[in-house]
Amino acid sequence: MPDLKLDILVIPTYNVEVLGIADASTYPVSPPVSSPTIEITIPGFGKVALPFEPNELNLFNSTSLGLSEVGDPLLPLPDGVYYLKYSVAPAYLNNVEKSIIRVDKLQQRFDEAFMKLDMMECDRAIKTQAKVDLNSIYFFIQGAIAAANNCAVNEANKLYNQASKMLNNFMKNGCQCSGTNYITNFY
């Protein structure tokens, strides 16, 4: 008979309006768990406690998280560091906590920039420079995710903000880049 071992996984939904959290716990056959609850601390909004369905993928949106009213259009969930705490009764003995950074809105903007790159009518050096710039931005996004996964919240926020700033500059400049960074570093 397995012992109780709680674990949760944040599952990519590829949707700015949905947060997916899967239960990856092992449960004893007897006694059944009671009061499965997840606490989600949403950046800029505070903490909400919600029922959690064991052995399932649990999906949360702006309505279920209390950010919008039932019947209103769903809102994009904010990017930033989320704190998750899954517990079963008694909660003080049986819980697991994780911090993650949600980057879905930033990733959506990155994807738009990436798609524009393929449609640009630029010379090779400029197009290559744009690829270098996008790779750098992607590196910062991945760094933010890694930092949040390792509870380095300040570092995660710094890396996220740098990626956002770089992406803003990239989008503003479009195909206006000079290509000199690529030529200097790679030729």
Image (spheres, grey):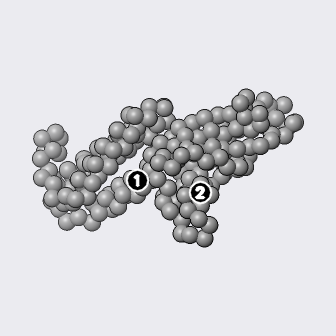
Residue at 55%, 62% (x, y): give it.
68
Provide residue 92's location: percent of width, then percent of height: 71, 30
Residue under the image location 20 percent in, 50 percent down: 129
Look at the numbered disc 1 and give the secondary structure of its residue.
helix
Q: Which badge, 2 or 1, is on the more N-terminal residue?
A: 2
Question: Which type of secondary structure does the marked residue at label 2 adopt?
Answer: loop
Give the mark count. 2
Residue 180 coordinates in the image, percent (x, y): 12, 47
Q: Position of residue 17 (x, y in %)?
A: 52, 60
Between circles 2 and 1, the one closer to the viewer is 2
User: Which residue is more in the foreground, 167 or 119?
Assistant: 167
- Please provide percent x and percent y for residue 105: 42, 55
Q: Is residue 61 visible?
A: no
Q: Which mark is residue 66?
A: 2
Task: Residue at 53% x, 38% y: name it.
Answer: 99
Task: Tell me the tag on residue 11.
Answer: none
Q: Is residue 66 left or right of residue 3?
A: left
Crowding near the residue tagged with mark 2, few <14, some 14–19, many ≥20 C-alpha atoms within 10 Å: few
Q: Which mark is residue 107?
A: 1
- Where 149 sits versus 129, above or below? above
Whether pointer 2 and pointer 1 mark residues with C-beta atoms closer than 8 Å, the reply is: no
Is residue 99 left or right of 136 when viewed as pictured?
A: right
Q: For the residue marked with disc 1, what is the amino acid? A: Gln
